Image: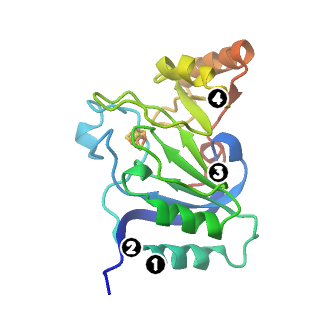
Amino acid sequence: MSTPRRYRVKEIFGPTIQGEGLHAGSPCLFVRLAGCNAWDGRPQTRAASACPYCDTDFLGGEELTLDEILQRLAARRAPASASLGCVLSGGEPLLQADRALLAALGAAFPWVDIESNGTRPCPPRPANVALCCSPKEIAGQPIVVDPDWWKILVPAQERFLERALASGKPVFVQPLCPDEGPQGPAYAAALARCLELCYRHGCRLSLQLHKLIGVP
Ligand code: SF4
């Protein structure tokens, strides 16, 4: 018998609220896969990375099989609502996510959001597994996905706005959040710019609800 594949998982948590994108405000569980191709995750290299604003700890984690991931999700789900969704995040989840993982999550949840930087192809997935691309400018790693919606960080990744708008898919604009949280003059300026893009192009505002209400 072959050894089951293991995924490096940083954390599985919830129930919480999906704070961003099309399912913002919806209750969900989170699977955070470890590792990213935009930053090695060490504090001392963050400023020089492709994402000097990254707010996520995706270092380390533990090796879990698909069955173990599903068991941990199931334990957190009961007795929560059957409408609870699932967010597959990272780091960059498409460094590890394969067809089997996406199929299993799609079968276990009414909706699944994959949150990707768009530089890795997405394996085939069930219709209820959506791909959100928050594109990042990473040297030598172009955006290769055709996502279900885009999430553009403003102002850091505005260079991708034209491409996102041309795709005809929903485009969310999200103010870049400083380390101290959604406050202060830089945040206010980014929020004002997002509103301008909403009014001018029909973008939708994404506000990281989880940060506003203080949940993980
Ligand atoms: S792609 Fe996302 S998780 Fe990776 S370093 Fe950038 S912001 Fe962080």
Q: Position of residue 173 (x, y in %)?
A: 61, 27
Q: Tell how many labels.
A: 4
Asked if ligand 1 lies within 8 A of label 4, the reply is no
**Residue at left 59%, top 79%?**
75
The type of residue carrying mark 3 is Gln
Foreground tag (3 vs 4): 4
The type of residue carrying mark 4 is Val
Q: Quadrant of residue 77?
A: bottom right
Q: Which residue is mark 3?
A: 18
Q: CA distance from mark 3 to mark 1?
A: 23 Å
Q: Which residue is mark 1?
A: 68
The type of residue carrying mark 2 is Leu
Q: CA distance from mark 1 to mark 2?
A: 6 Å
Q: Earlier in the sequence, mark 3 or mark 4?
A: 3
Q: Residues within 10 Å of mark 1 (few under 14, many from 20)?
A: few
Q: Disc number at residue 139?
A: none
In front of the other: 214 or 174: 174
State the SS at label 3: loop
Q: Which residue is mark 2?
A: 64
Q: Quadrant of the N terminus?
A: bottom left
In front of the other: 149 or 153: 149
Q: Quadrant of the C terminus?
A: bottom right
Q: Quadrant of residue 169?
A: top right
Question: Is residue 185 in view from this perspective?
Answer: no
Q: Which residue is mark 4?
A: 171
Q: Position of residue 136 (x, y in %)?
A: 42, 31
Q: Are the residues at dot 2 and dot 3 in contact (C-beta closer than 8 Å)? A: no
Q: Position of residue 166 (x, y in %)?
A: 61, 20
Question: What colour scheme has been applied to the protein in the rendered image?
Answer: rainbow
